Image (cartoon, grey):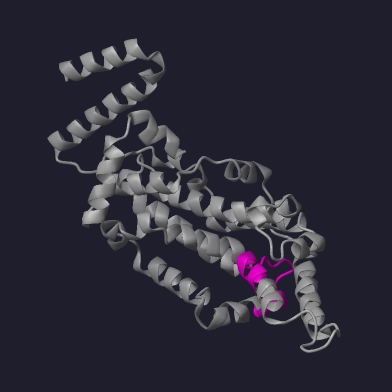
Amino acid sequence: MDKLHEARRFCQNLDPSCSRGCNRLIQMLDNRLADVKTKKKVPKSETWEDVNFIRDIKPELVAAQLTHIELDFLNNISCDEMISMLGKDVASDSLCQNVNKYVNWFNHLSHFVASAVLAPELGGARHRTMEYYMDVAVSCFSVGNFNSAMSVLAGLSQSSITRLHKLREKLDKNKADHLSTLEKQMSPSENFKTYRMALKNALQQHTCVIPFFTLLVKDIHTTCEIKKTKVEGTELINFEKCWELAGHLVEFQKYQSGVCDLQSDGNIQEDILPAEILTEDGMMFSSYEIEEPVTVNDKKRYKAFLEKAPTQRMESFY
């Protein structure tokens, strides 16, 4: 370790800006050596609740806050914007910025969930954190918030999490069964047949329903692509296509007009929206740290992470 500290001082003299990264690397190595001496592969933390601030809140209340957030995003999108996005690259079109924000929110929530499960400080509490977000996904589905339910499911289905077999073996069987049932409800088989039935039932049971937005957009695109604007062989307008598009927009406005009577807590919403999340690479690196890579490709990828400079390998992941 003396040689290592000497190398650290040498690097800091050359470039003072790398001081933080060097100190972090030394701390990581110290922790790993301590684990090896005590024969612990993963450090156990008694303060894991501090890492997942949201973990102290009931899943039902979190589902309620997610529903309020979803409705706000949904209401910012106009019908004109929904029409403008047809045939365009939404991500690069300024006319579709609210649609783009909503799609980004879906990805943010998905990565937020995965980041929480993969947090390095969790240790032995990791399976409880995963069970917690499984409950959140079920709660979202129960209140008719299908977009958040799908997003949380996507987070729990990240390859960085599904590869953690030891973690999944610790999960409560009843909670795992509930998650399996939810996955079947949101299954894409037969063009999301089961989900569409659940959506129809939810509209009769709840004053506010949040649809799986990506599928709603896909349905509109499908109508535009399959049906021609003009009747084949003529110059007549295809009113069947116009009628079907109008139906989609009326359905969209119905979701926007929903009144969310679930409990609202602005503090929780403000904590979720700007929360730091891991990138795809960051999630995989954390996953390899939790359970060592087994396949050849995973081993190569993990080796590439380790060869990066500390600041690149850690800080660029957030």
Q: Looking at the picture, does residue 104 appear above or below residue 312?
A: below
Question: At 58% across and 53% down in the image, what residue appears?
Answer: 62
Residue shown at the point (52%, 62%) measured from the top left: 137
Image location of residue 77, percent across then percent down: 76, 57
Provide residue 21's location: percent of width, then percent of height.
36, 25
Instruction: State the residue lying farthest toward the top.
Output: 13
| Between 62 and 184, the one nearer to me in the picture | 184
Position of residue 143 measured from the top left corner of the image (x, y, whole percent): 63, 66
Q: In the displayed image of the protein, which residue is found farthest to the front?
A: 233
Residue range corresponding to the magenta coloring: 200-218
Q: Is residue 301 left or right of residue 208?
A: left
Looking at the rendering, which quadrant does residue 12 occupy? top left
Kindly tell me whether residue 229 is visible in this rendering: yes
On screen, 168 above or below 226? above
Residue 71 lies in quadrant: bottom right
* Horizontal side, residue 55 vs residue 232: left or right: left
Q: Quadrant of the N terminus?
A: top left
Q: How many marks?
A: 0
Find out whether residue 226 is within the magenta segment.
no
- Residue at 51% in and 40% down: 276
Q: x, y (%) of residue 115? A: 44, 47
Looking at the image, the residue that sits furthest to the bottom is: 233
Q: Say if residue 44 shows up in the picture.
A: no
Query: Is 215 within the magenta?
Result: yes
In the picture shown, does residue 176 fall above or below 109?
below
Which residue is more in the foreground, 194 or 177? Answer: 194
Q: Residue furthest right?
A: 236
- 272 left or right of 314? right
- Considering the whole magenta stretch, tell me its main secondary structure: helix
